[in-house]
């Protein structure tokens, strides 16, 4: 059973419904930035209101919070990604991704494609 989010694309008479206008600039979203493991690369993107957003394209280190201290450690591998299992194969970093570090397994708590930084916390297993 599918969840239907929009009205049907057809009228009662069987004719096609047409779009009355194109999306306005403020209604458009942005493409997935696909932050991955690799040599550090951060991109700046303009946002609404003339502001800027830093977007992580590639990163090899994570800011790891442990017992009130924060250390910058290297990401060894991507272990699990609840957003999409294919992201593990591609080594993509999103919020909630579990990565292997020298300190142990850590979960990414920041949104790399939105905030421009990768923060995480150690997880007990």
Image (spheres, grey):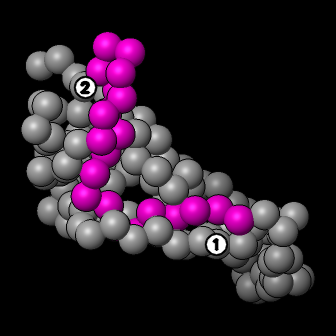
Where does the image place residue 32, in percent across and percent down from the top left? 49, 68
**Residue at which label 2 appears:** 122
Residue situated in front as seen by the camera: 25 or 13? 25
Report the disc number at residue 80.
none
Residue situated in front as seen by the camera: 19 or 97? 97
Where does the image place residue 104, in percent across and percent down from the top left? 12, 31
Q: Which residue corresponds to the image point at 17% horizontal and 17% vertical from the top-left?
A: 124
- Indicate whether 65 appears above or below 3: above
**Residue at which label 1 appears:** 45
- Indicate whether 22 appears above or below 96: below
Separation of residues labelled 2 and 1 (CA atoms): 30 Å
- Indicate whether 104 appears above or below 46: above
Taking 48 as reference, is 113 left or right? left
The residue segment tinted magenta is 52-72
Taking 76 as reference, is 109 left or right? right
Where does the image place residue 27, in percent across and percent down from the top left? 79, 68
**Dot 1 lies on which element?**
strand
Does residue 83 appear anywhere in the picture?
yes
Q: Which residue corresponds to the image point at 45% horizontal and 63% vertical from the top-left?
A: 56
Q: Which residue corresponds to the image point at 78% horizontal and 63% vertical from the top-left?
A: 51
- Please say if the residues under marks 2 and 1 sit with CB atoms less than 8 Å apart: no
**Dot 2 lies on which element?**
strand
Q: Which residue corresponds to the image point at 82% horizontal and 84% vertical from the top-left?
A: 22
């Amino acid at each position: 059973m599918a969840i239907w989010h929009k009205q049907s694309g057809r009228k009662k008479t069987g004719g096609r419904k047409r779009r009355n206008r194109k999306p306005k600039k403020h209604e458009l979203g942005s493409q997935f930035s696909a932050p991955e493991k690799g040599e550090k690369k951060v991109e700046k993107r303009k946002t609404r209101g003339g502001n800027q957003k830093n977007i992580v394209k590639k990163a090899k280190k994570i800011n790891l919070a442990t017992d009130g201290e924060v250390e910058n450690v290297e990401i060894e591998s991507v272990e699990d990604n609840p957003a999409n299992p294919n992201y593990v194969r591609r080594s993509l970093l999103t919020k909630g991704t579990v990565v292997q570090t020298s300190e142990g397994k850590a979960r990414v708590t920041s949104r790399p494609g939105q905030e421009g930084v990768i923060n995480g916390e150690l997880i007990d297993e």
